[in-house]
Amino acid sequence: MDRAKVLLILSLALLVTGAVWGQDTQALLESYLRNFDKGDLATKLELIQDAAKRNNASLAPLFKHTIDFVVNKSSRGKNDSILRQLCHISLDQLEAFKFSEARWLVWQLFLADADTNIKIKSLKALTVLASGDKIIIQNLNVWLANQISAFKAGQKPELGVILRCVLTLGGLGDESSFVVIFNTIIANFTQEISNAAQEILVKLKGNFKELIVSIIQTGSIREKKEILIIALAAESLNEKDKAEIAELALNEALRSSSVQQKELKDIREIRILANRALSTYKRKEATKLILQYFEVALVEYEKGLLSKPDLLEIIRCLGNMERAEAAHKLTEYLGLLNLYTEQKKVYDEQIVIETINSLGRLGQKLAFDVLMNVRFLPYNTMIKSKAEEALQNLKW
């Protein structure tokens, strides 16, 4: 039957029987389905366009039926554009009506259709349709993981589809997506994709802290660094959680080594970031770790591998720990600085002042002698003034 006849029959049927059908939406749906199956492609498109204008949720099975038709159509060619129009309209309607019964057909369409726009629209629809479907979510995780592997192997990625997949996984919000979303950040497709993945990562369901800890404990050096950066910036973590994560990261970084310069640089950056967080949150329980780091840092500073601001941050961190062992180490260090100044008549004002200030904050009386010695050494007036202030802060 040609298109014009089908449309005429459908229109007359709706007019004549409208009063009888009333609210019988099932009859309306069956009429659309019956005529859809009879019509050619152009007729099918006009029927779907007409059905979409009705904005009737009871017609959702018709749009599912349309996707089924497209997925199972064996041949493509000159009518590809009509098939894609059918897909666009049907996907919009299925998403609008949240017709989850169509989710597997939409997933099949995503896999089967090579058109980028259809893939993106299918993923967008799945954000709504696949909510709570662990199997589809896992399929999406695997698909994205495969894209990351292909990209690392040198294949050109479909960036728009990858971005939409990340957004879809974010909308679905399942904790099973944590690792693949994190790996998307590491893959560095584009800044837009990385930014979207990072924003999504912190909002996924599940125990965010535990997921971070697992990566710090088992991930590569680069993964440890990236997840630490994300964790310290995450608004969903409180200060205690961030301090504990920083302590774990510092411990891992102090135990790590590498022969690769890039990894050694990442290890040093982890230590710096972790120390800064521990200083900010005054994580006293990490004092022994910071003392270990201080010994490593002094060697790295002498070799030019650590900047002065970063060394100052470590000294400042020890001054925030309120522990006798921190005071003992800094007292020992100021003694060495005093000896060097006495013998060489040369000193670094910033390092000496930071050490003195930290001893003043710690307030341990064991620092009395080295602070008193500052008076009699060739330090400048500023340093001697800071030493006097620190002496006043000692607890007796």
Image (cartoon, rainbow, N blue to C red):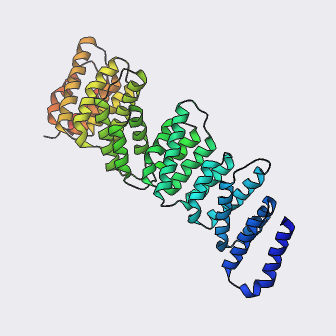
Relative to 22, 173 lies left or right: left
Rendering quarter of residue 365: top left
Whether 167 is drawn above or below 330: the answer is below
Tally the numbered discs: 0
Q: Give coordinates of residue 364: x percent, y percent.
A: 17, 37
> Which is nearer the eye, 182 or 110?
110
Rendering quarter of residue 35: bottom right
Picture residue at 81% right of the left edge, 81% below the top: 15
Picture residue at 53% right of the left edge, 45% below the top: 143
> Which quarter of the figure is the C terminus placed in?
top left
Picture residue at 84% right of the left edge, 65% below the top: 3
Whether 374 is drawn above or below 245: the answer is above
Rendering quarter of residue 285: top left
> Which is nearer the eye, 101 or 40?
40
Relative to 319, 47 lies left or right: right
> Which is nearer the eye, 186 or 236?
186
Q: Give coordinates of residue 313: x percent, y percent.
A: 34, 33
Relative to 40, 350 lies left or right: left
Instruction: Residue 281: tell me if it is visible.
Output: no
Residue situated furthest right in the rendering? 4
> Which is nearer the eye, 164 or 7?
7
Residue situated furthest bottom in the rendering? 20
